[in-house]
Image (cartoon, rainbow, N blue to C red):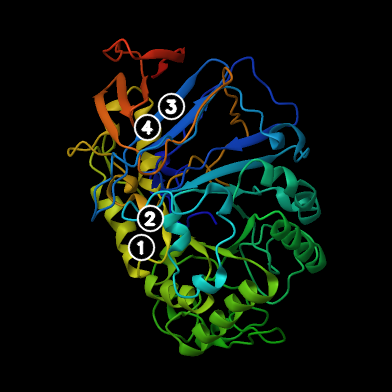
Amino acid sequence: MESATLTSPFEKPIPFSCLQVVKFPTAGFSLRSTIRFLFYRINFPNSLIAFFGAKFSFILWTELRDSNSVVSTESSAFLSLFIGRVRYPIAHTAFSTSSFWISLCFVLGDPAATFGQLPCNSLWGFDERNQQNDLGAVVRSGREILFQAFNWESHKYDWWRNLEMKVPDIAKCGFTSAWLPPATHSFAPQGYVPQNLYSLNSSYGSEHQLRALLQKMKQYKVRAMADIVINHRCGTTQGHGGMYNRYDGIPLPWDEHAVTSCTGGLGNQSTGDNFHGFPNIDHSQQFVRKDITAWLQWLRNSVGFQDFRFDFARGYSAKYVKEYIEGAKPLFSVGEYWDSCNYNGHGLDYNQDNHRQRIINWIDGTGQLSTAFDFTTKGILQEAVKGQLWRLRDPQGKPPGLMGWWPSRAVTFLDNHDTGSTQAHWPFPSNHILEDIHSRSSIRIMEAQPNLYSAIIGENVCMKIGDGSWCPTGREWSLATCGHGYAVWQK
């Protein structure tokens, strides 16, 4: 869901201020069906982002540390750094429609957890009986890869049936969860103006097609993430003030008392920011929370969704998200807490501590049960690549976004259906892969200057971006790949 307020032109492509993947022109490169790869990074304490265009390659490594624990250097193995033209099957065979976005998210685990607790190929298969007592198990695994399986135009393309055919490819690529668009009946075709929450017939396809897709995903051990749009709801009939704030004739037949008083209802004041134009749901009403919890349990236990993404999470108190997670018990949750970064008269402030603190406060409000998209990093990174690489280190020598303070709850990303451009392609250069740089890998930031950023990740990978001159000392380092404005070394 697009943010209701955008206070800065810099932030429009930044829904969450977090590690933002930057897109550069790729002269001479075209992808026939304009399939779009958007690289989402979730929760890597020492995170890496790699962007490779025909003329440019960008790799960003960042350190993530839990606020209450120190990243262990002894447990560092190497997370997959893709340097090379990685031929994901889906990149060439999936989604032949003219506009499809592929988004990846890496979920970081809690550094306090024991590394290697779960093998990579078991990420989907958490014992859900144990999950009833441990809602943080997936978050702590540190091995999640989230795939955003839609964009703003996907409703035009028989989407559930299209996705079902590509589930084997999605699974083959190693994705552990696929974020699906809102699946319930909506006043708008994209799904973000819900009305009949119990109707699964949408512009993306029929209920039968959706259930077939979810069954196929279960078969291939790819979890389904539901897009939970519960900040607002479009009414069916006019009520108080002549507004469509009643829900007669459909399941959950609420009246005006389910709508906040600040958006035309007879309920209480909103506990968050208003999303203007539609009746905002009053989550302070017990009957509303009871109904929403039952609906989420239905999505979780009957329909077959396992993960939740909370749309427009600024719109209502985080304590209600906590209640909903505890009631429905999704395996993994992430919130879209998107507000403006801090700007001055000259552009983006260097210090974004207030911005990332607001996201942390929201996560705390959920009882630490939910992660959040790292909009802070996205906002900073988008400016850093404009010859301002000094932004990539905060005064404490840490990454300047949410990932620098609370990596186990930071979902870093490059773009999504709200922020991305249809012209962003993501080709990799030569065919090299360095494996097992993970969420607990150590990082040493060596330089962070206007035209130079360099770091050593773990014990075996070193990189630099920018036009400044730099290389690691020691004969043990060999150049793995390089190009205009970047270089990567390995031992």
For marks 4 and 2, the one nearer the N-term is: 4
Give the alpha-carbon distance from disc 4 to disc 1, as whole Å: 24 Å
Left or right of 23 on screen, residue 319: left
Residue type of the residue flagged with mark 1: Ile
Residue drawn at the location 51% of the way across and 42% of the way down = 40
Left or right of 398 on screen, residue 240: right
Give the alpha-carbon distance from disc 3 to disc 2, as whole Å: 22 Å
Q: In the rendered view of the protein, which quadrant contains the N terminus?
A: bottom right
The answer to which quarter of the image holds residue 225 is: bottom right
What residue is disc 3 on?
Answer: 59
The reply to whether the C-beta atoms of the residues labelled 4 and 1 are less than 8 Å apart is: no
For marks 4 and 1, the one nearer the N-term is: 4
Left or right of 157 on screen, residue 352: left
Q: What element carries label 4?
A: strand
Give the alpha-carbon distance from disc 1 to disc 2, as whole Å: 8 Å
The reply to whether the C-beta atoms of the residues labelled 1 and 2 are less than 8 Å apart is: yes
What residue is disc 2 on?
Answer: 409
What residue is disc 4 on?
Answer: 61
The reply to whether the C-beta atoms of the residues labelled 1 and 3 are less than 8 Å apart is: no
Give the alpha-carbon distance from disc 1 to disc 3, as whole Å: 28 Å
Residue type of the residue flagged with mark 4: Trp
Label number found at residue 363: 1
The reply to whether the C-beta atoms of the residues labelled 3 and 2 are less than 8 Å apart is: no
User: Residue 52 location, x and y as percent?
Assistant: 53, 23
305 up-or-down from 153: above or below: below
For marks 1 and 3, the one nearer the N-term is: 3
Residue type of the residue flagged with mark 2: Arg
Q: Which residue is more in the foreground, 228 or 114?
A: 114
